[in-house]
Structure formats: C-alpha cells, structure tokens
C-alpha cells in the first residue's frame, strides 16, 4: 500500500507514528480573492496546495501534507467582487494555532508554503510565533521564491518590473498547467500600474525596496497586475517542476536541521 501523506486521512496512532518518523508538516496557505477576469478566486490556494502536494507525494516517508488554509488577508482587493478578507491579527492567530497544535502533538519541523503575496508579513509572524512558543521550528516560503533566477531569465517575456505581480504571466502560466479548465484566456489582458519607479513597483521575481500596498482598484482596471497575455501552459509546467524540486530539497534540509538547545545567559 502506498505511504499516506495527507494529514486528514491519518488515524491518531498513525499521526503518532508520523511524528516518530520525524516527518515535516507542510501547510499550504492561499487566499480567496479576485485574480482578474480570467482566473478563479481560488488561484492562490491551488498554486500553493498543488505544488506542496507534488513535493510531499514525492517523499511521503519524510513529510505530511496538511489541509490548506483558504482564507487570508487581502482587504485591498475588496473593491472587486468575490474577495473574502480576514483581519491580519485573526489570520496570524489562526495560522499560529494550527502550528502550535502540530507542535503539541510532537511535530518538530513545520513548513508554511505561501501562495499569496500579501500573506508574507503575516505568515512570517505566524512562523515566528510557532517557533518562539513551542518546541518546534517553523519556516515559511512563498513558492515563487523557489524559482531559480535562470528560469526567470529563460522563460519570462513580460516587462520587469511589473509583468509578474497578480493574475500575471507567472500565476496564469502556472494555473494553465495545473488547472487549465479554470482559466479563461480570452478575458486576459495586460494591466500594469502607470505609477512605477525604482521605489514603487510590484513584481514576484523580486520585491520592491519599499513596502507599500494600496487599494488595488486605485491602479488596476481589471483586477490584474501584470501581463497574463504572455502566459502559456508550457511555461507553467517548467515553473512548477522547478519549484517542486527545490521544495523537496527544502523539506529534506528542514527535516535534517538540528534544533540546538537554547542557552539562558542571565
Ligand atoms: Zn495570486
């Protein structure tokens, strides 16, 4: 029988066994929000979940896949229908509680895999909360951070910065590969903020030096930020495969990582 890796399918003795095997607990976190007229609201859940699933399925003795977090912080998208916004402190506490529960059961290594740009500061704090208030260590990675630089250089056709931000060349390519039936390319169009500078821009390939996010409807007419017309399923396949390979490396490294004892120097 194939080794189980979906957390919710385990019995409690099996969870105890998974802890004894020092498996890494992998929690995908997305959001439910508008992604332009061509992508489904669930885009960020699908990307984070599917890449995590592919990674964990490739190493089922070493990790478990948690059920995904669907709702998150995104009130800057509320001017577009569909977005479900959760307050920042609620979101931080919710994810922290999931991690602390895992630590309570004995999991020592927890990885949050993020699919939504604006989750980054909140999940960073949640990961620190879990690490600071349990015996486990918790790390967080946005999946696009795992794309090798050379692959951006090879595949990217949209302008930098700006072409890859939201419902963009990157996200649309990945969704075309993972669930092409949910993508309506006939409604995809280029929509990049007019006000851009070396200080103010948004791009998944590398973040701007200044942290700033205003209401999306102030700078996007379509709900897109980037150029989804440059997206293809083949690019999506290349991006996903590269992310999954590196996510597996990351999970292995986290699993092997020594948790050194704290030292009280008072
Ligand atoms: Zn997204």
Image (cartoon, rainbow, N blue to C red):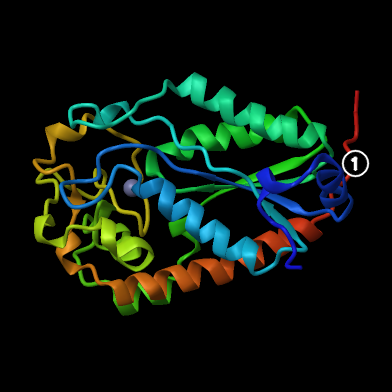
**Residue plotted at (34% across, 49% down):** 43
The C terminus - image quarter: top right
**Residue plotted at (35% across, 54% down):** 204
Q: Is residue 208 visible?
A: no
The N terminus - image quarter: bottom right
Q: Which residue is mark 1?
A: 261
**Residue plotted at (42% across, 20% down):** 87
Q: Is residue 121 above or below residue 50?
A: above
The x, y position of residue 96, in whole percent, is 63, 29
Q: Is residue 258 visible?
A: yes
Secondary structure beneath label 1: loop
The answer to whether the beta carbon of the residue marked 1 is less than 8 Å from any atom of ligand 1 is no
Residue 180 image-quadrant placement:
bottom left
**Residue plotted at (14% across, 51% down):** 192
Q: How many marks?
A: 1
Viewer-nearest residue: 13 or 232:
13
Residue 81 image-quadrant placement:
top left
The x, y position of residue 201, in whole percent, is 24, 47
194 displayed left or right of 47: left
The x, y position of residue 61, in whole percent, is 77, 63
Q: Is residue 23 above or below residue 87?
A: below
């Amino acid at each position: 029988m194939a080794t189980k890796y979906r957390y919710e399918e385990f019995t409690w003795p099996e969870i105890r066994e998974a802890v004894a095997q020092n498996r890494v607990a992998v929690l995908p976190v997305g959001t439910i929000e508008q992604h332009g007229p061509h992508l489904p609201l669930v885009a960020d859940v699908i990307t984070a979940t599917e890449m995590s699933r592919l990674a964990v399925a490739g190493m089922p003795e070493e990790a478990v896949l948690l059920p995904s977090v669907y709702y998150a912080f995104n009130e800057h998208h509320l001017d577009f229908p569909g977005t479900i916004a959760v307050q920042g402190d609620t979101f931080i506490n919710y994810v922290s509680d999931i991690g602390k529960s895992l630590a309570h059961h004995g999991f020592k290594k927890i990885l949050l895999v993020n699919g939504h740009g604006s989750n980054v500061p909140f999940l960073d704090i949640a990961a620190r909360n879990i690490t600071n208030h349990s015996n486990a260590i918790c790390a967080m990675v946005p999946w696009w951070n795992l794309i090798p630089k050379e692959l951006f250089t090879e595949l990217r056709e949209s302008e930098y910065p700006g072409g890859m931000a939201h419902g963009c060349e990157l996200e649309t390519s990945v969704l075309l590969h993972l669930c092409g039936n949910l993508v309506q390319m006939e409604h995809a169009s280029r929509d990049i903020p007019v006000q851009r500078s070396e200080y103010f821009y948004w791009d998944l390939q590398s973040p701007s030096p200044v942290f700033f996010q205003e209401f999306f409807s102030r700078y996007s007419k379509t709900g897109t930020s980037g150029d989804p017309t440059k997206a293809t399923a083949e690019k999506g396949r290349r991006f996903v495969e590269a992310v999954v390979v590196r996510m597996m490396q990351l999970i292995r490294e986290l699993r092997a990582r020594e948790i050194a004892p704290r030292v009280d120097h008072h």
